[in-house]
Image: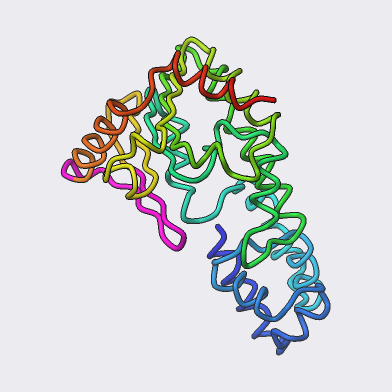
């Protein structure tokens, strides 16, 4: 829907002989932002769709896309993963630098989303935060409960964005019966733990997916070979991490 709506906006703009600069000025965006929306890199916002609709005399056809785009609250590269996560009965993950989205407080999520580059407009920031909080229903609202395992490298906890509220949130979630939270201390780090974050999912249909994410690209794979490698790395890391009880005490000592 992002790409389709952006493409339609470009087609209507071209048909109406409206330049990208004219649309950008009218909608109070930069031309580069309009280009990103037209290419499907960024979601067209309600404001730009309404302005484009009026400028291009689309008679409501562009504005109508707002209803459908409002359902897409995640970046394009993460949408398929989020769909699989909603179907999950089991989820195992390792994080090397950031608190996982499922465990973030609203303040921590805002700090990350507001300080990314290129910057996001306020509407998109609020949508991303809302979507991240909605994802967290997987922790408590599924029946039967989803089995969840998180391993956090110590660097995650030492981040300047991790405040007392976030540490207490981690402790709160770790007490849920369906959640296992472990910490991998610096002194126990192995090579497999320094190769980046990863997630392994199993759906109710017993399909397995491996998700790896980097700064510029993400990959969701059902390839058994990839899944095997991710499962192997996770097993090695979990074996080196502190037990859930030890991890809880580790985090408690960090709370002032």
Image location (x, y in percent) of residue 183: 44, 28
**Compared to 57, does 172 lie above or below?**
above
Image location (x, y in percent) of residue 161: 65, 44
Q: In which quarter of the image is the C terminus?
A: top right
Residue at 65% from the left image edge and 25% from the top image edge:
255
Provide the residue span drawn in magenta. 211-225
Front residue (pair 242, 72): 242
**Compared to 30, does 231 lie above or below?**
above
Q: Is residue 229 left or right of residue 51?
A: left
| Display colour scheme | rainbow
Is 238 covered by the magenta stretch? no
Is 223 covered by the magenta stretch? yes
Front residue (pair 65, 147): 147
Q: Is residue 112 left or right of residue 223?
A: right
Q: Is residue 181 left or right of residue 221?
A: right
**Name of the residue lying farthest toward the left:** 225
């Amino acid at each position: 829907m992002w790409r389709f709506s952006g493409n339609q906006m470009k087609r209507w703009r071209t048909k109406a002989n409206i330049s990208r600069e004219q649309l950008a000025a009218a909608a109070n965006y930069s031309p580069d932002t309009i280009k990103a929306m037209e290419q499907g890199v960024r979601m067209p916002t309600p404001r730009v769709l309404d302005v484009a609709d009026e400028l291009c005399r689309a008679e409501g056809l562009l504005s109508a896309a707002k209803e459908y785009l409002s359902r897409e609250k995640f970046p394009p590269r993460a949408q398929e993963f989020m769909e699989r996560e909603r179907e999950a009965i089991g989820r195992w993950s390792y994080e090397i630098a950031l608190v996982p989205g499922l465990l973030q407080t609203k303040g921590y999520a805002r700090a990350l989303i507001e300080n990314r580059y290129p910057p996001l407009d306020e509407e998109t920031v609020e949508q991303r935060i809302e979507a991240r909080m909605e994802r967290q229903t997987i922790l408590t609202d599924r029946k039967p409960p989803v089995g969840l395992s998180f391993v956090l490298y110590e660097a995650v906890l030492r981040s300047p964005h991790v405040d007392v509220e976030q540490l207490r949130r981690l402790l709160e979630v770790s007490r849920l019966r369906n959640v296992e939270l472990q910490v991998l201390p610096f002194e126990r780090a192995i090579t497999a733990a320094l190769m980046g974050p990863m997630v392994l999912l199993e759906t109710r249909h017993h399909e397995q997916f491996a998700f790896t994410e980097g700064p510029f690209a993400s990959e969701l794979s059902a390839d058994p070979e990839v899944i095997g490698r991710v499962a192997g790395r996770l097993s090695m890391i979990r074996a080196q991490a502190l037990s859930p009880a030890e991890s809880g005490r580790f985090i408690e000592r960090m709370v002032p």
